[in-house]
Image (spheres, helix red, strand yellow):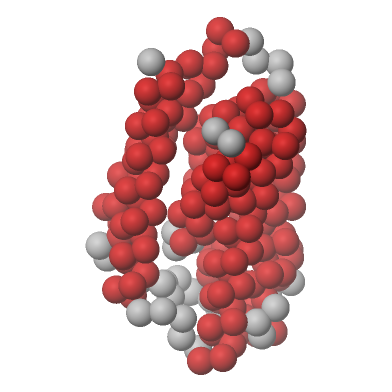
């Protein structure tokens, strides 16, 4: 894949993860209600700090992996992408944007972003399955490919959580749940497509 394609893939897959309801989304909503539109970007900074550490760990391992194991990693990543895509499709039907309880979260936005990321088991599952395979693939284009993918990934996080916080700050609502579910369905389909592409590479 080219550098722009890697950046686009990183953005799309990153957006899928950001859209999924979870503790980081709840922290963003709470921060926006408490301190205004800057809550989203600040939570994202904390989330990026958490991901930066795990990315460095994965890359350190990726650089030592033999070519013999690349199809295995691609296969594992492909299966994981299909599974996560299927989970996204199944959860999209009843997904609601403003789910969760924001009470009791008094940590600063950046710290909240770190805590809600590392305390989420799906964060670790995703990075050591789907994420590691994607990083491995992007690293085939060198450091530029790796930076393009992770830059696109983080851009999606920043864009979505900023949109959430701006929307809440201005009107206390963001988007209609039907539109949100449609976005999740589209992202789920894209995950499955990416997963099938990885499986073809493994084979």
The answer to whether residue 6 shows anywhere in this view is yes
Q: How many marks?
A: 0
Between 115 and 148, which is closer to the camera in this rendering?
A: 148
The answer to whether residue 128 shows anywhere in this view is no
Between 201 and 88, which is closer to the camera in this rendering?
A: 201
Say if 184 sits above or below 170 in the image: above
Q: Residue 17 in the image: x percent, y percent?
A: 49, 53
Looking at the figure, which quarter contains the C terminus? top left
Between 113 and 37, which is closer to the camera in this rendering?
A: 37
In which quarter of the view is residue 97 placed? bottom left
Looking at the figure, which quarter contains the N terminus? top right
In which quarter of the view is residue 52 placed? top right
Q: Residue 56 in the image: x percent, y percent?
A: 74, 35
In which quarter of the view is residue 138 placed? top right
Say if 108 sits above or below 195 in the image: below
Between 97 and 175, which is closer to the camera in this rendering?
A: 175
Residue drawn at (60%, 11%), measured in percent from left and top?
Answer: 67
Residue found at the very far top of the displayed protein: 68
Q: Residue 74 in the image: x percent, y percent?
A: 48, 23
Residue drawn at (34%, 56%), measured in percent from left and top?
Answer: 186
Say if 135 sits above or below 13 in the image: above
In the picture, measured across the screen, residue 194 lies left or right of residue 146, that is left
In the picture, measured across the screen, residue 188 lies left or right of residue 93, that is right
Residue drawn at (39%, 44%), measured in percent from left and top?
Answer: 191
Say if 20 sits above or below 198 in the image: below
Q: Residue 185 in the image: x percent, y percent?
A: 31, 57
Residue drawn at (63%, 64%), measured in percent from left and top?
Answer: 158
């Amino acid at each position: 894949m080219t550098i722009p394609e890697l950046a686009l893939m990183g953005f799309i897959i990153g957006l899928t993860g950001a859209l999924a309801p979870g503790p980081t989304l709840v922290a963003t909503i709470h921060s926006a209600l408490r301190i205004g539109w800057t809550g989203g970007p600040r939570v994202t900074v904390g989330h990026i700090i958490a991901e930066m550490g795990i990315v460095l760990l994965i890359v350190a391992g990726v650089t030592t992996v033999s070519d013999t194991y690349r199809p295995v990693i691609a296969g594992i990543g492909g299966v994981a992408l299909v599974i996560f895509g299927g989970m996204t499709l199944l959860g999209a039907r009843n997904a609601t944007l403003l789910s969760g309880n924001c009470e009791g979260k008094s940590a600063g936005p950046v710290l909240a972003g770190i805590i809600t990321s590392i305390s989420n088991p799906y964060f670790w599952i995703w990075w050591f399955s789907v994420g590691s395979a994607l990083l491995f693939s992007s690293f085939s284009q060198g450091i530029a490919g790796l930076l393009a993918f992770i830059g696109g990934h983080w851009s999606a996080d920043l864009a979505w959580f900023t949109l959430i916080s701006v929307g809440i700050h201005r009107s206390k609502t963001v988007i209609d749940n039907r539109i949100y579910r449609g976005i999740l369905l589209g992202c789920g389909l894209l995950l499955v497509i990416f997963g099938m592409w990885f499986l073809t590479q493994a084979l």
